[in-house]
Image: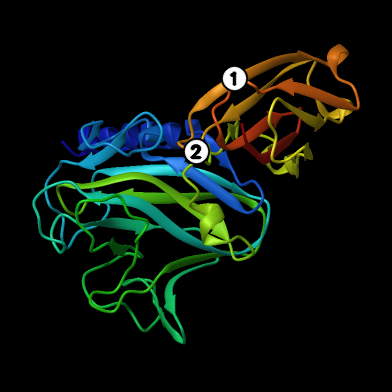
Amino acid sequence: MIRFVFLFSFLTFNALSSFAQDLPVYIEEDGIIAIELESAGEYFDWSVDTIIDGYLGSSYLRYSGPNYFGSPGNSLLTFKINISTTGTYRFQWRSRIAQGNSNTDHNDNWLRIPDATAFYGKIGNSTVYPHGSGMTPTPNGAGSNGWFKVYQNQTNNWTWDASTSDNDPHPIFAEFDSAGIYTIEISGRSQGHAIDRFVLYHSSVSISDATWLGRPESQTMDPVGTNELTSEKLFLSPNPAVESLSINLPKENLNDSFEIQIYDTMGMLVKTFNKNKSEVHEKTILNISELIPGNYMVRIRGEKILYSGQFIKQN
């Protein structure tokens, strides 16, 4: 029996290690990482839903497993991120109470960033640290092993409200002193709490920019060589634009063939331009006359560089 348990534990550990190594790595760009919850791949008691309108991406996740009010780490969702801009980041998720009418039930789940330099809740001069982190003070309410209970108190709408410490809400922050790959973990707590996406953004980034609904999900790449990536802003003109958009493209940093992608305010891909290096000039002109008026984002992935920019389409 002992040998069987040991073998089972060994195989389970190796399976989980292999799974962790296979996770996509989401790339921080201009101090922002945005991830759709359905991108987790393995859901463990989370339901993929499209019932409630207003979600971003293809769907959202609703926690449908047992209530784990005092025991974090169950029904785990794991994400890998690559940080190139060091410093302090704020964490927020876009969530909704998807069960009942109370603003204090079905409104929270667990969060941990285990390998951050620091992970805490802060408002004004008050800072709280996760239960089990070895640091004090700790937040009001449950928690253990470095997990925060993260809650919101709004009904009937999607909200970016995400705080810890019961009846004393503290926004959540993480610090990264060095560039590299880090882990974000979410685990089930309250059945009926739905999460659409989360963002992690640098102190130099505004809340409105980080939580802009038109922001596409962050791009991913293989773990090997992630630290060599850089990001640059695209110069777009005119802006606002009516019929055409001019983009300066540095030919030396592009693949032989590449895509120029345009996303709308819901983060949906609305137009793609396929280009070859031979077609790229100092200024590449795109026909955007078919787009309806509104705000858009342009994205281009080069060999080791991510380019992005925003523009307004007018009549």
Residue at image x 43%, y 79%? Answer: 123
Which residue extends farthest front? 315
The secondary element bearing badge 1 is classed as loop
Q: Which residue is mark 2?
A: 265
Classify residue 237 by image quadrant. top right
Classify residue 107 by image quadrant. bottom left
Q: Colour scheme used in the picture?
A: rainbow
**Rendering coords of residue 124 (x, y %):** 46, 84
Q: Which residue is mark 1?
A: 290
In space, the residues marked 1 and 2 are separated at their CA atoms by 16 Å
Residue at image x 27%, y 62%? Answer: 151
* Camera-side mark, 1 or 2: 1
- Left/right of residue 278 with respect to residue 287 in the rendered view: right
Residue at image x 47%, y 34%? Answer: 23
**Does 84 appear above or below 300?**
below
**Rendering coords of residue 181 (x, y %):** 58, 47
**Does 32 appear above or below 59?**
below
Q: Quadrant of the N terminus?
A: top left
**Does 250 appear above or below 29?**
above
Residue flagged by tag 1: what amino acid is it?
Glu
Residue flagged by tag 2: what amino acid is it?
Thr
The secondary element bearing badge 2 is classed as loop
